[in-house]
Structure formats: structure tokens, C-alpha cells
Amino acid sequence: MPSFKLIEQAILKREHLFTSTQTNAFRLFNSAGDSCEGLIIDYYNGFVLLQLYDSSLYQDYSKICNDCKQILSSLHIPVNGILLKDRTKVNDPQQIAKLRTSILVDGEMPPENFAIKQNNIIAYVDLIQGQNTGVFLDMRKVRETMVKYYHNGGRLCNLFCYTGLFSVHALKNGLQYAVNVDISQTVLNRAKQNYVLNDIQYDSRDFIKLDCRQYLKKQIKQKVHFDFVIFDPPTFSRNKKQNFSVKTHYRDYLALIEHITKDGYALTTINAVSMSVRDYRSLHPQHWKLEFLEHEPEDFPYKSQPYLKAGLWKIP
């Protein structure tokens, strides 16, 4: 069980993040990186989300909740509600939806259409249903570093786009056009909502429900060109027609991306501690030039090595 002092030390390290005018959602406690394996605590614009990956922590969640509330109160940080999400391993797939539904342990539930700010863009988040909230807090530094590359404008292709935040951020920082590609209509609908939230106009051509490999092949055939490609895939995913695995398919995707991004940039990521920086770099063609490589931001300390590898590559 994490002590009060351990949680306090972690939150105090991040105290300066509460003063940011551009971001109001970030991590307060990062598992082994903050010396308690299995415990994640995130702050979302007045709400705290506890996520437990270790079932042995369940007997202590009430104390963890009270400790967080007391520490944040002493810093004069508003806490409207605290929610708890079960992230332990599930053997029965039919139980996932039920177990991944957050329960309220203190205060009130987030309002409908609850939004946060990250990198000065606004995004809807769902702290209750599913495994992911709709925004990846660990991408804050990556987006921040990308800003200067958008100033000259251009066209962006956002593969595995999820809720479209890379596109929203790019469009708010100088890009003229972005297309969002994902196999899930549900996340594309959420991406559209994020466009509206940020006063970005769109039409049906900006959101494509299609397997990303099929989309790339279609663009190559039509000789379409993009100045930027975002390739932020899941480590593994499965749908009715296609599977995706970083180890099996990553290089194939990069070869396709090169065809539509000559003299442009590709932001590529891997979210897996099992893949080292060396492994990540080795997946890319030797003639690609690495502009920068980012890892998870300061509120995601790690015990041994970073899991996030996010690099911007210049494609000659």
C-alpha cells in the first residue's frame, strides 16, 4: 500500500502543472515510476481518476482516495469528484465492459460532455466507460514539440486517429487540412465532436472509416501527397478483416507512408516498454532523417526505460 508520504511526494513534484494555462489534465502518480507498481492517479480538470492494475490495492483504495483528497485540498486544488477504474487483467472478454466502468468513490460524477484542455486545445473525455478516456495524457510533450513544424501550413494524414486530437492540434497551429482515418466509427464520431469543440469546420471527407492499410494503398494509387503523416498505432489491434501488430506490420506501414509523404514528415510512435529506443529506430528506413525523439513527459516518470518512443522523421 502506498503511504500518504509517497502520494504526497508524487503530487508535489507535479504541483507546478496546476498553474498551466494550456493544460488542465495530467498524471499525478505513475505506478512504479512513483514507487508503487499498479497504481495510476490522473487529474482531469477538477476530477481525479484512480486506476488499479494490481488487485491487491483494492483493499486500500478508500485510503488512497482520502489521501489524494487531503493532499490536493492542502494545495487549494479543486476536486469535484474521485472515480475508481478496475484495470486488472480480465480472462473473460464479456466481463471487460463491466469491470472497466468507473465507480464514484467521492464527490460527484463528471457532467455530460465533460471536457479538458491539453496543449491549448479542448477535448471531450469519458472518465466512466471503457479503458481509455479519449485523450492520451502522455502525448503532451510530443504535441508541444510539433508546433513549430506546423507554422508553414500543409496537409496532414492522421492514421489510427482515435479521437482526432493530433489533427485538431495541427489545425489550430497552422496546418490547412487534415484527414482522419480509423476503422472505428465510434472514435471518428468523437473526433468530429472535438472539431466542433475547437471551432473547426469539417465535412465528410475529413473522416474516413477504413482500415489504414487500405487507405494508404488507395492514396498511393491516386498519387495523393501529404506534408505530414501521424502514425500512432496501437501495439496490437484486431478487427473483422485485419490485425495490426507493431512487430509484424510496422515496417510495411512505413513503406506505404513513404509513398505519400515524399519531402514531408512522419510522426511515428511505439507505446511499449518491450521495444527499446534502438528497436524503434531500427524499424525505420536508413535514409529517413530523425528530427526529434520524445518520450513520456515529466509527470510520467519511469523505473527503468521509457515506454513511449515518438519520433518525427523527415522523408527525403
Image (spheres, grey):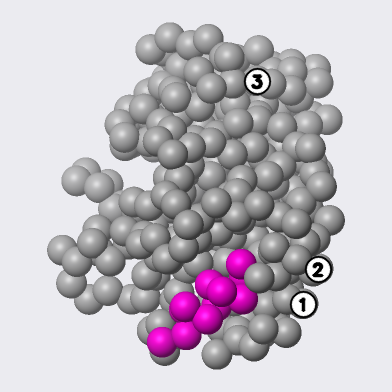
Residue 284 on image: x %, y %: 64, 51
**In magenta stretch: residue 67:** yes
Q: Name the residue under label 1.
A: 9
Numbered disc total: 3
The magenta-colored residue range is 59-69
Asked which secondary structure carries label 1, the reply is helix
Near-viewer residue (251 or 155): 155
**In magenta stretch: residue 73:** no
Q: In the picture shown, does residue 304 fall above or below 226?
A: below
Residue 42: quadrant of the picture: bottom right
Q: Mark 2 points at which residue?
A: 13
Residue 182 on image: x %, y %: 38, 34
Residue 5: quadrant of the picture: bottom right
Q: Quadrant of the C terminus?
A: top right
**Left/right of residue 306 with respect to residue 111 in the rendered view:** right
> CA–CA distance between discs 2 and 3?
32 Å
Q: Which amino acid does label 3 sit on?
A: Leu
Residue 296 on image: x %, y %: 69, 59
Q: Residue at coordinates 53% horizontally, 10% vertically from top-left? A: 201
Q: In the picture shown, does residue 253 fall above or below 100?
A: above
Residue 171 circle label: 3
First in sequence: mark 3 or mark 1? 1
